[in-house]
Amino acid sequence: MASNFIKYAESLLASSLSDYSDWPNASVPNGPGVYAVWMEEELVWVGSAGGSLRSRFERHTKGNRRGSEFLKAVYARLMFRHMGLEKAMQTASETQLLVDAITGKFVREQLAYRYLATRDEKTAEMIASAICSGQTSSPKPFLNPS
């Protein structure tokens, strides 16, 4: 059974890459699935959406960090690494609303994603776990390795 999840994980990692800058993407389903987020050639996040992949990606592009571990990690670790210390400190002093807008802009301009629809949330979580734990040919994601 675990080998099936690894097979699906490899399929996800080899699927076509979509830029957040091209959002909305009509081909993204409104159901559960697993997704991988990339910054250039680096896998930075793997996650699962139990409800809707479409609404998950929509939230990513808006940058609202409240309740989103992905967006919190993008802001706290990925943006700061990308921007450098001086610019990061300037950004950190901005208001919450502006920080969310800046985070959303960073996602739209710098990141891309792959996705795989699944039949349910549990399947999506198992596939994401296989990738995050290093059971696939890809390195573990930068922001959420397990």
Image (cartoon, rainbow, N blue to C red):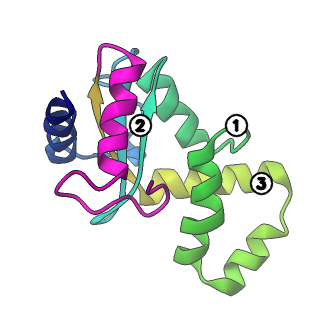
Instruction: Name the amino acid type tagged 1.
Output: Gly
For label 2, the residue is: 23
Tell which of 74 and 48 is nearer to you. 48
On-image quarter of the N terminus: top left
Residue interval drawn in magenta? 118-146
**Left or right of 54 on screen, residue 29:** left
Could you tell me how far apart the alpha carbons at marks 3 and 1 are, in whole angstroms?
17 Å
For label 1, the residue is: 67
For marks 2 and 1 on the same chain, the one whose residue lies earlier in the sequence: 2
Disc 1 element? loop
Could you tell me how far apart the alpha carbons at marks 3 and 2 are, in whole angstroms?
21 Å
Callout count: 3
Q: Does the magenta stretch include residue 104?
A: no
Residue 53 place in picture, x, y as percent: 42, 25
User: Residue at the location (74% across, 40% down)?
Assistant: 66
- Which of labels 3 and 1 is toward the front? 1
For label 3, the residue is: 98
User: Residue at the location (44% across, 57% down)?
Assistant: 145
